[in-house]
Image (cartoon, rainbow, N blue to C red):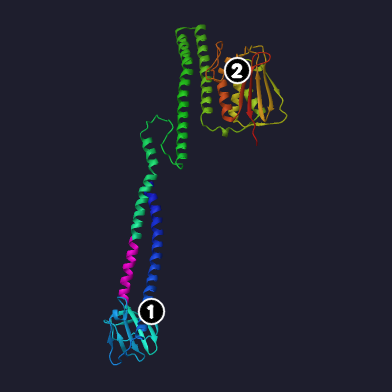
Amino acid sequence: MSLRNRLLLILGGTFIVLWSLAALWLLGDLRREMTVALDERLASSARMVAGLLGQLPQPLPTHQASPFSTIELGLQSGLVCQVSSLRGEVLVHTPNMPQATLAEHGEGFHEVSIGNERWRSFTLKRQHLWVTTADRIDERETLQTAILIAAALPVAFALFGSLLLIWFGIGRGLSPLQRLRELLAQRDAEDLQPVHVQDLPKDLQPLVATLNQLFARICAALERERRFTNDAAHELRTPLTAIKTHLQVAQMSSGDCAQHALQQAETAVDRMHNGLEQLLLLARVESTQDFDKDGQVSAQTLARHALADLIGVPGYQRIDVINELTEEVYVAVPESLAVASLRNLLDNALRYSPVDSRVELYMAVDNQRLLLRVRDAGAGLTEAHIEQAKQRFWRTSSAQSGSGLGLAIVQAVTERYGGELHLQAAPTGGLDAALYLPLSQS
């Protein structure tokens, strides 16, 4: 069922029920009021006839009933009147009045049946006479039915008109949704620009805002996918070419030359493997993938795992750890990302510092955040290079290895979890990388 039909069913059904109940109540009240008015007419007519009879100069005959017209008695059309003695003899009556006495039931209102006709009567006693006025019940019901129909017709027309207006009103109210549907239907599949609809009601503005947010997230996801594809092609092209070249050299040569070519091919494979791992990690960090299942890690465990990952890297023994933590603290960053961030900082320090120099890892708590400061004694970076160091695949002109993704990954982790990465020149030369990670509150 369409939204328009559903609204029409709900609103129209409610409208019909309420109008029907109101109409039944009003028509029932009108019917009661009409009955009271007709009875009051009988009573008033009987009193008027009794007053007129009291003013007649001649005595009423007692041996035979005398017919009087309703005009002579001053009665309204449709009423009959009968005057009888206390002994039940009919003295005066209007034409078409039944010969049977109507006063035998006593004073007040009564319903009597004479032949096939039912009458509503009112009897009034005046001295030695009974004055009775009556009208046929079928005529009363006919009059009431006509009045009720006349009163019900405007209600029926109003109800029908209201339903018609509700139909057009619902269509008019849903027109912004129709325009939104047409606008989306006309869009190209690759068009993810925000939606703009003229004269949009306030109730639909949150829907369009949410839709635009969805488009923005889809656009960002597609941009990440395109960037990952471009980065993967950029990162794999050179190692694959080198591997192919070295293998061809190994096939065409023998002895030490072939062995050297195979070693170079293995080095290229390692470089490609490390680059792919870094690239995949960066893509996961920038996506909406949930890392919470990795769990939180303490600062001491974080440093221990990062150092363990560097075993086998040339010169990893040069790392000095200065731990000023007085108690065990936990970082509000998944373990895999926190370990990868510290490992990348330490790997860069080892890679770009002299082989006989020391690399310092300083650990402390600073303003409710874990500070991991890595200092090396390398050539360092200029201010211009510091601004570029966090970009993808950026490497110094003198760099012979590395993927250029280490600092980009650290920056992506800090942006996602509310940390900070500051790069500056170390006081003794080299690079000072300060990584701030938020602490867990639990």
| Label located before the other in sequence (2 or 1) | 1
Is residue 203 toward the left or the right of residue 396 in the image? left
- Tell me if residue 346 is in the magenta stretch: no
Q: Which residue occupies 54% across, 33% down?
A: 290
Q: Nearer the viewer, residue 48 or 187?
A: 48
Q: Quadrant of the C terminus?
A: top right
What label does residue 43 carry, if any?
A: 1
Residue 298 spot, x, y in % from top left: 65, 30
Residue 131 appears anywhere in the view = yes
Crowding at label 2, few (<14), some or many (≥20) Cα neighbours within 10 Å? some
Q: Which residue occupies 68% across, 24% down?
A: 363
Report if the CB atoms under discs 2 and 1 are less than 8 Å apart.
no
Residue 129 spot, x, y in % from top left: 36, 88
What label does residue 83 carry, if any?
A: none
Q: For mark 2, what is the residue?
A: 348
Amino acid type, callout 1: Ala
Crowding at label 1, few (<14), some or many (≥20) Cα neighbours within 10 Å? many
Amino acid type, callout 2: Asn
Q: Which range of residues does the magenta coloring cover?
A: 136-153
The label nearer to you, 2 versus 1, is 1
Q: CA distance from mark 2 to mark 1?
A: 115 Å
- Tell me if residue 145 is in the magenta stretch: yes
Q: Secondary structure at mark 1?
A: helix
Residue 365 spot, x, y in % from top left: 69, 28
Q: Report the magenta stretch's main SS.
A: helix
Is residue 38 toward the left or the right of residue 331 in the image? left
Determine whether 17 is above or below 109 in the image. Answer: above
Residue 38 spot, x, y in % from top left: 36, 74
